[in-house]
Image: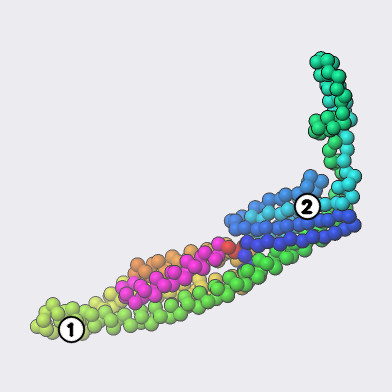
Amino acid sequence: MIKSMTAYAASEKISGSTIVTVEIRSYNSRYLDLVLRIPGELVLLEERVRKMVSQWIQRGRIEVKVQLKSETEEVSAFEIDIARAVAYHNALLQLRESFGLKSDISLELMVGAGGIIKPADIQKDAESLWELIRPCFSTALENHDSMRKKEGDFILLDFEKRLGFITDGIKKVKEIENRLLDHYRKRLEERIGVLTKGMVEIDPARIAQEAAFLADRSDISEELLRCESHIGQFREVMNANEPAGRKLNFLLQEINREFNTMGVKAQSADTSHVIVSIKAELEKIREQVQNLE
């Protein structure tokens, strides 16, 4: 199945006074590279998050951001570090006595030290957190997958168009190659006629033999046959119900190799021109394949 590796999706759920937000961004990568940005209280759930992502995505750099926001916690979730406050107060008293200062030690001065009043580290049950996050996370993954499929559908249409161009090009090459034997025979007759100025009688059998030799040396029928086979496999893979990126990339390498060989062996300028245009289309397909899972 054709799926793009690049996509973005987000989901938000509200449960009571708690708001859960999940964002998923994905980019091209040769392997599955998962980056999690989650609050500290969700660390125990990291393995579950990774497992859930791997069930939906097999390749790409995946950045997952999970946020928890509770309105009640924002109002009441603070604590005082009494030990730190006492130590700081004692230090201020000692400083005042050492320098004979008369000023009072105010609350503002104490709070200004930092670290005395801080957000509370609220401990939550991992299972209850997971039940809160999982539906939101599942929705985000579904939306992300839909976006990858949608992009993959556009790429699939582009592949079909370019593969059609390549298939037509192969037919043209076959037609040109089928005329090569007659082309070589006529060219040999013309060259011998020019060199001998018509003073030597041309042996048709010998001319046919030499033309057959030239045609055999430049024969690309095997390469054309393998290309047709590879293109058939390419179509099967891109329509199969599994990630296609790696297999399609391998098949493209094989197809390119065959056309490179044909380019070296081809003796016809017409054949060479068609091969060059086909290779240009293959390069465009290769660029798109790099975006596929």
Tell me whether circle 2 and circle 1 mark residues in contact (CB < 8 Å): no
Which residue lies at the image location 54% right of the left edge and 66% below the top edge? 288
Q: Is residue 230 left or right of residue 133?
A: left
Q: Secondary structure at mark 1?
A: loop
Across and down, in percent, residue 123 comes to 87, 44
Q: Determine the residue located farthest toward the front in the rendered image.
A: 102
Across and down, in percent, residue 144 comes to 70, 63
Residue that mark 2 sits on: 67
Q: Is residue 66 left or right of residue 110?
A: left
Which residue lies at the image location 64% right of the left edge and 55% below the top edge? 61
Locate the N terminus by quadrant: bottom right
Which contiguous range is marked in magenta?
266-290
Q: Determine the residue located farthest toward the left in the rendered image.
A: 199
Across and down, in percent, residue 44 comes to 80, 47
What numbered label is drawn on residue 203? 1
143, 210: nearer the viewer: 143
Query: Would residue 15 be visible to someone looking at this image?
Result: yes
The majority secondary structure of the magenta stretch comes to: helix
Q: Indicate whether 130 appears above or below 180.
A: above
Residue 284 is covered by the magenta coloring: yes
Across and down, in percent, residue 177 comes to 35, 79
212, 239: nearer the viewer: 239
Q: Determine crowd level at label 2: few under 14, some 14-19, many 20+ residues with C-alpha closer than 10 A.
A: some
Which residue lies at the image location 25% right of the left edge and 81% below the top edge? 185
Q: Amino acid at mark 1?
A: Asp
Q: Dividing the picture into quarters, in which one does residue 222 lie? A: bottom left
Q: Amino acid at mark 2?
A: Gln
Locate the C terminus by quadrant: bottom right
Mark 2 / mark 1, whichever is N-terminal: 2
